[in-house]
Amino acid sequence: MATLMVINGPPGIGKTTTATALAAERAPAFRLDVDEVRTLMVGWEQTPTESGTIARRMVTDMAATSLTAGHDVIVSQLYGRLPDLVRVEKTATATGAAFIEIVLMAGLDDARERFVARGGRKFADLCGDGNELAGFDELYDRVVAVLAGRPRAIRIDSVRDDIAATLAAVRTAAKWDPPATARS
């Protein structure tokens, strides 16, 4: 049975790094990210809300196609609205796939520091020229609120600068060991 795993969390917490490593263990598997799909739309910056909606739908459709073919899918994305996350879970149910929901977290101050240290385009997009972290705090709070509304979500404290420890915690909590061929 294929599995759809969602890795949620605030910006810069290690979602994509964790998802990429897990997908590599399950190859052939797909790691999908709404933000990456959104950037495939030329001119997405002019219509960020619309392009984000389209990208979320595309990721869900891509996941359904992959799960139906028997491939695991790992979606690394900040889900700050319950309806978006429910839609992804329904995709797993509709395709007969298992569903695992992971939320990588850290305390607000630690999460902020990690996001600032990561820098890059997402930092600039979220914080603007003044590098204000108000946008980050809002997203962090939305993840916390979603987590509170998802009792089956598995909260994992992301270990700063130690992807191996974070991966081990995700595998253990989700009971998701690498296939035998990936362990050898």
Image (tube, rainbow, N blue to C red):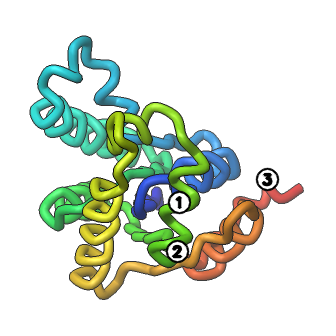
**Amino acid under label 3?**
Thr
Give, as a three-letter code, the residue at label 1: Ile
Q: Position of residue 38 (x, y in %)?
A: 29, 29
Dots 2 and 1: beta carbons under 8 Å? yes
Residue 53, percent from left and from top: 14, 39
Relative to residue 160, is residue 137 drawn left or right? left
Q: Earlier in the sequence, mark 3 or mark 2?
A: 2
> Between disc 2 and disc 1, whose residue precedes?
1
Q: Position of residue 160 (x, y in %)?
A: 68, 66
SS at mark 2 in the image = loop
Closer to us: mark 3 or mark 2? 2
Residue closer to the observer: 159 or 133: 133
Going by the numbered disc 2, the residue's amino acid type is Ala
Q: Badge 3: few (under 14), some or many (20 or more) residues near its Cα, within 10 Å?
A: few
Most foreground residue, 96 or 74: 74
Q: Which residue is mark 3?
A: 181
Residue pictured at 50% horizontal, 43% vertical: 31
Question: For the residue carrying disc 1, how many other residues have a C-alpha within 10 Å: few (<14), some (14-19), or many (20+)?
Answer: many
Residue 28 lies in quadrant: top right
Q: Position of residue 151 (x, y in %)?
A: 30, 87
Residue pictured at 60% horizontal, 50% vertical = 117
